[in-house]
Amino acid sequence: MEYTEFLKGKERYHLQTGFDVEDSQLHPKLKDFQKFCVKRALKYGKFALFENCGLGKSFQQLEWAKQVYNKTQKPVLILAPLTVVGQTIREGEKWGYVVTKASYNINHPNFAAIQIANYEQLENIDCSIYSGVVVDESSIMKNYSGATRNLIIDTFQKTHYKLACTATPSPNDELEIGNHAEFLNVMTSHDMRSIYFTTDKEIIKGNKYRLKKYAEKEFYLWISSWAIMIEKPSDLGFSDEGYELPGLEYHEKQIVTSERDNGMLFNTIIVSATNFNQELRFTKLERLEQVAQIVNENKYESYIIWIKQNEEGQTLRELIPEAIEVSGSDSPDFKERTILDFTDNKFRVLITKVKIMGMGINLQSCNNQIFASLDFSFESLYQSIRRSYRFGQNKTVNIYLITTDTMQNVINSIKEKEEKFINMQDEMRLAILKNYEVERSERKTDHFKGDNFELILGDCVEEVAKLPDNSIDYSFSSPPFGALYVFSNDPKDMSNVSNNDHFLEHYKFLIKELFRVIKPGRLVSIHMMQSTTLLGRDGYYSIVDFRGDLIRLYQDCGFHFHAENMIRKDPKTAAIRTKNRQLMHGTTKSDSSIVRPGLADFILTFKKPGVNEVPIKNNIPFDLWCKIAEPVWIDVNEVDTLDYRAARSSDDERHITPTQLTPIKWCYLMWCNKGETVLSPFSGIASEGYVAVKEDRKYIGIELKESYHELAKKNLLEVELSKGQMELFEVTEYDEVESN
């Protein structure tokens, strides 16, 4: 494989595996923006529509399914929440589509091109007969157990045409986005987190992942390659006519709770997730009487009442006799029939729970909602409100929040989450829309030369390829430690890989070039450390034999394994810095089968076959040789490095790990004469160059990241200046002695 081809493969953009259709082939009643979305989804074959509620996702998915059937002549399955199935069938009838409940018997009288089933029926359906699948309200996958989520993804792993439809997700809900990517065969959820997300140590509970700062643009570009995300048609350049949202008004009804025997002078105003349900029981009657008062005072208005506990439903039915409740224990037929009756205004008060009817269903026939038992979940509140507050609603939507003086922290928490969600959602949507068709800008290049060095800003593989054959005397560098850390989102960055095998595949391009440019009989040294699996990422603890992988890779490229030195590292320092459970003394008290010793660094050295024409003679003192000849270097100061902090840019997530200066110096003494040229393909802040100039060698350094490159310039200019001053001082002192 050519290097450019390999880099192209690292660009994580979704492949087009679908087909094109003309506007004239689509349903004439589709809006222009809806046609655009359907055509794009068909072209890619596997795609997601993240659209605001009321933009006609059902209509679009029905047309998508029809077109896939026309192309393949095999039926398409729509998976939907139980409460949405009936509405989708009715929606199909409205627009002239025949949609039936799933039946894989081709001779069945209800067999149709477009079939629908609820998620719970999946295990009872032969999905092999379908050429395509639509997962309606696809964000619901994250609310299922791991087994069911995996069943959905695994069942349709080889299905050629896939469409996922849901409202706009939060950019920081990595589980929801990852599930979509995995379902659509774009990338596994695990790989997505590894590449674009990092753990946030400041978060103690809940979602501990956040987007890496440097990866935000690339993350949005990546999503735009397999999804459309819009809040309104004008986001895609179309008219918003007919898509104006009505007013939305919140009415908070706060109840002052009665005194209770809790050993305190006043009732606490802090409700936690732990005592939340207990608080609901304490305040049940007061809250539900307030709900009944609102409903009974407005006899001509319809209402949806959201509850949390079964006993709340029973009490409300007593307080509001005309209300009908849909509960989890009801039959599927009852749920489906009751929802349709409510949307047809056959009764005016519906009592239910968010987990039953809070997602996907269209309830815009009702513009009044009451949250009788508000909890900490902003998502539940948001999704429930969207059942009524959606495009097509022509009345002001009234949201009644029944709270108590003990629940103010719940309200505050929801408001904070709402503000953060809206801001992040807007940023994500706008970033994606700006980049639907993106061409990568030309990378900045720079060649900076001093008296004894040359620094190159660019890709090490491409730049080393420009060097003449057999022109380099020695190479020392510290390549990325496999897939341990991802430092940037650039495809040319060797740390930006999905796993260690992927890194080795990329690194091999460089080793082949190193073998070409190193003189016969001369050497290449690399600084590395063993890597480990991560419990959160891989599910188990294990040391990865990265050292062995590198040795075998260099040997495969023609080098001989010449030498290795181990550098001791302080395990206490590593434990403090990494918080690795395997290094914690406390782990020995709970289960010492988990613990392991600290990991050392290694200097691995490889020789190019052939005769070394210029012997290396640096007159190493005997006492120093005794230190260097030790297989383990135990007295290397871990902080004997150049200062890297100035090279960190605002979007850095990981600090660079410069090699200690002493091992570099010792390697130069052994394997490189004064005046010879040292090459570092991973220059970083130029630790190798700093020592090279100081020890009278020439230096060529290549670095991909601009902030590191700029600090490398500063470091090398400073060492050249200080060395020049030292030489001047020595010459002047000698001349004065001679003249005397």
Image: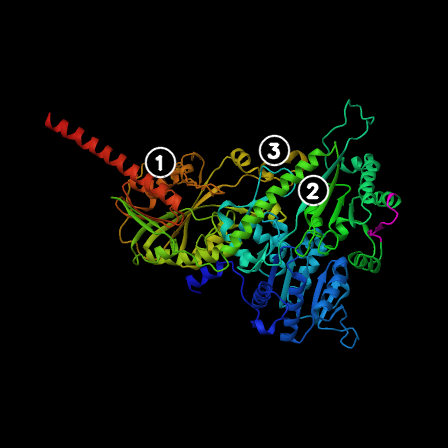
Q: Please give the label number shown on residue 624.
A: 1
Please give the name of the residue rendered at 21% of the width and 30% of the height, measured from the top-left corner: 729
**SS label for mark 1:** helix
For badge 1, the amino acid type reads Leu
* Place of residue 157 in the rendered image (x, y in percent of width and height, measured from the top left): 64, 64
How are the residues colored? rainbow
Neighbourhood count class around disc 2 (C-alpha, 10 Å): few under 14, some 14–19, many 20 upward = few
Q: Please give the label number shown on residue 250.
A: 2
In this rendering, the label closer to the viewer, 1 or 2: 2
* Place of residue 529 in the rendered image (x, y in percent of width and height, measured from the top left): 48, 45
Neighbourhood count class around disc 1 (C-alpha, 10 Å): few under 14, some 14–19, many 20 upward = few
Residues at marks 3 and 1 touching, judged by CB atoms closer than 8 Å? no
Give the quadrant of residue 330: bottom right
Give the quadrant of residue 150: bottom right
* Place of residue 13 in the rendered image (x, y in percent of width and height, measured from the top left): 52, 60
* Place of residue 210 in the rendered image (x, y in percent of width and height, measured from the top left): 57, 44
Residue underneath mark 3 = 585
In this rendering, the label closer to the viewer, 3 or 1: 3
Q: Is residue 321 magenta?
A: yes
**SS label for mark 3:** helix
- Work out whether residue 560 or residue 225 is closer to the camera in this orientation and state it: 225
For badge 2, the amino acid type reads Tyr
Labels 1 and 2: the sequence-earlier one: 2
From this viewpoint, is residue 509 visible?
yes
Labels 3 and 2: the sequence-earlier one: 2
In the image, residue 444 above or below residue 91: above
- Work out whether residue 240 or residue 484 is closer to the camera in this orientation and state it: 240
Residues at marks 1 and 2 touching, judged by CB atoms closer than 8 Å? no
Q: Please give the label number shown on residue 706.
A: none
